[in-house]
Image (cartoon, rainbow, N blue to C red):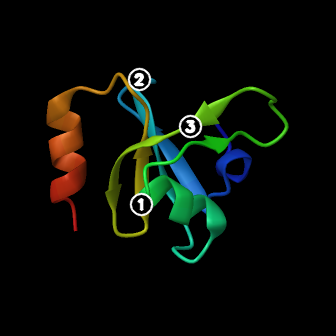
Amino acid sequence: MAAELVGGLDGFKYKDSIGEIYEYDTSSDEYQKLAAGEAIPLEGMAGFTITAIAVNGKFVLPGDDVPQELIGAFNFFE
């Protein structure tokens, strides 16, 4: 998914489409909502939203079916 669809600056897919990680401007509305546990809409895709399962600095890991070991690695990354 293109980062701009979720208000991100950049992003990448990891592990053969298991998930994606996005980089945000931490002052953006989208980041603030995700960091607070709220869902944000995908731009131009009515009815579709994402929520963060983990936030690490300016990086957000969205999703709901990500293996715990990947969440742990994401949270450990500095």
Q: Is residue 48 above or below residue 58?
A: above
Residue 50: give its label: 3
Q: Is residue 5 left or right of residue 20?
A: right
Residue 16: give its label: 2
Q: Secondary structure at mark 1?
A: strand
Q: Secondary structure at mark 2?
A: loop
Give the mark nearer the N terminus: 3 vs 1.
3
The total of numbered circles placed on residues is: 3
Quadrant of the image containing the C terminus: bottom left
| Extreme residue toward the right, this view | 44
Provide the residue designation for mark 1: 59
Give the residue at x 72% y 45%: 5
Give the residue at x 23% y 26%: 67
Q: Are marks 3 and 2 in contact (CB under 8 Å)?
A: no
Give the residue at x 54% y 62%: 31
| Extreme residue toward the bottom, this view | 27
Foreground: 50 or 78? 50
Residue 74: give its label: none
